[in-house]
Image (cartoon, rainbow, N blue to C red):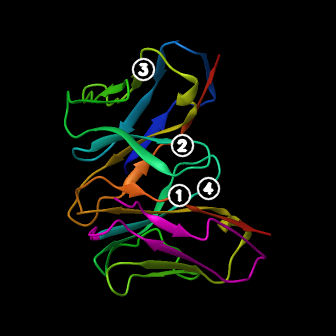
Amino acid sequence: EAGVAQSPRYKIIEKRQSVAFWCNPISGHATLYWYQQILGQGPKLLIQFQNNGVVDDSQLPKDRFSAERLKGVDSTLKIQPAKLEDSAVYLCASSSGLTDTQYFGPGTRLTVL
Amino acid sequence: GNSVTQMEGPVTLSEEAFLTINCTYTATGYPSLFWYVQYPGEGLQLLLKATKADDKGSNKGFEATYRKETTSFHLEKGSVQVSDSAVYFCALTINTGGGNKLTFGTGTQLKVEL
């Protein structure tokens, strides 16, 4: 069974630029999560989708971050404009349901200069 | 709110030594508890979990027991190997019906030397 796929694996941009990350969850998984992991910290949830609806986006900085999951499968997370403090690893995870184990992708490491 | 506290690293051990990584939690309600491991250059992998008090999760020689009375979920392994070198994250989740986000600790780096 293929795992959670993410791209790109690495991205370097300058502040005020825009960036987008892509995630393809495990086939059949209805629930998709985006986490932000700042160096030296544990991951923090940004947004959670159930199919193509948002379940929890309470910690998403909505003035600059946006995410969508239009067809209930793939998802895109966008940052516009980026700030220095957005430098982090962005992790995508999926689970088959709201109460099931979450499986993580390899992450995208973002560096904002 | 919910939170997880785990011992700071790095923890450096010799091969075949006994490992304990402490984890305590604060939660409203009845959480499920997890240990995730992150090997260098890889994503987070679920190591083990426990969903109710007194449950013991185990995998690959690691184990942890859900202790409600001490709000703890300490990770143990009787004999570590060099290949166990990684960052270990303790985490909890509570299903509130509105989502089941994982709340993580800050991670503990384990280094195992020959």
Q: Which residues are magenta?
A: A1-30
Spatial CA distance of label 4 from label 1 is 15 Å
| Dot 2 or dot 3, earlier in sequence | 3
Type of amino acid at the residue the image marks with label 1:
Pro
Q: Which residue is mark 2?
A: B106
Q: State left or right for residue B95 relative to residue B103.
A: left
Residue at x 72% of width, y 83% of height? A17
CA distance separating discs 1 and 3:
26 Å
* Numbered disc in front, either 2 or 1: 1
Instruction: Point out residue B79 in the picture as x, y percentages from the top left corner.
Output: 46, 15
Q: Nearer the viewer, residue A37 or B4?
A: A37
SS at mark 2? loop
Numbered mark located on residue A38 in the image: 4
**Front-most of A89 and B102?**
A89
**Can you tell which mark lies on residue B77?**
3
Q: Are marks 4 and 2 on the same chain?
A: no
